[in-house]
Amino acid sequence: MPELAQWPTEQASEVSWNDLPVKARLCEGWCTFRLKILSDWETTAARLGLPNIGMATSSAVAIGPGDWLIFCPEEQRENVLAKIALSQGYAVETSDALVMLDLGDAAEILSGLTGLNVESFGSGRATRTKLAGIGVILTTADDGSLRMIFDISYARHMRRFLEYAI
């Protein structure tokens, strides 16, 4: 039987996000979960205060029908897991699989790189698109800064792209 490849263990913190033409800061100290609710997801989402498709809050991004990324500081992990249990869905912790970068006020730059209108990055919005040939989620934090979420295995690729594309 052939051996299975091992998932990349590189941490996003091992990639230098300094000295880029755009301000990029790794968001650390967060837990992330992917939550799927299979039945009556609209009612359950409303009851739990989850955003609608294409929208985001400071603690969740709706990425599809019945599908959310949930964020919380590490110290709130147990409370969030209890809330997720009320959803009657299922969740997978994705903290070690995703990178979340704070890109500050780079909405115009990302608009040029993605072809999306700057309004796509407005407060409370979430947009799934491709950047550097990989799927990313772009959303705006409560403080107005733009955040980009993507698979950790592309951290070095995204770093090089941000360095040379801008």
Image: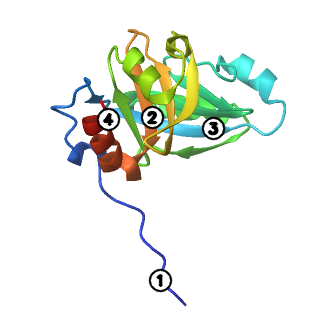
At x 44%, y 73%, the residue is 5
Instruction: Give the residue at mark 3.
Output: 35
Quadrant where the N terminus is found in the figure: bottom right
Callout 2, which amino acid? Ile
Of callouts 2 and 4, the N-terminal one: 2
> Closer to us: mark 3 or mark 1?
1
Q: Nearer the viewer, mark 4 or mark 3?
A: 4
- Give the label, 3 or 2, closer to the camera: 2
Label 3, label 2: how many angstroms apart (C-alpha)? 16 Å
Circle nearer the N terminus (1, 2): 1
Specify the amino acid type for callout 3.
Leu
Residue 88 found in image quarter: top right
Per the model, the C-alpha gap separating discs 3 and 1 is 30 Å
Nearer the observer: mark 2 or 4; the answer is 4
User: At label 4, which amino acid type do we have?
Assistant: Ala
Name the residue beneath numbered marker 4: 165
Q: CA distance from mark 1 to mark 4?
A: 37 Å
On residue 149, the disc is: 2
Q: Position of residue 93 (x, y in %)?
A: 51, 45
* Residue 51 x, y percent position in the rendering: 65, 19
Question: Measured from the top left, where is residue 58 in percent x and y?
Answer: 48, 17
What's the residue type where badge 1 is placed?
Answer: Glu
Disc on the earlier residue, 3 or 2: 3
Disc 1 + disc 2, Cβ < 8 Å: no
Q: Is residue 69 above or below residue 47?
A: below
Disc 2 versus disc 4: distance between alpha carbons? Answer: 18 Å
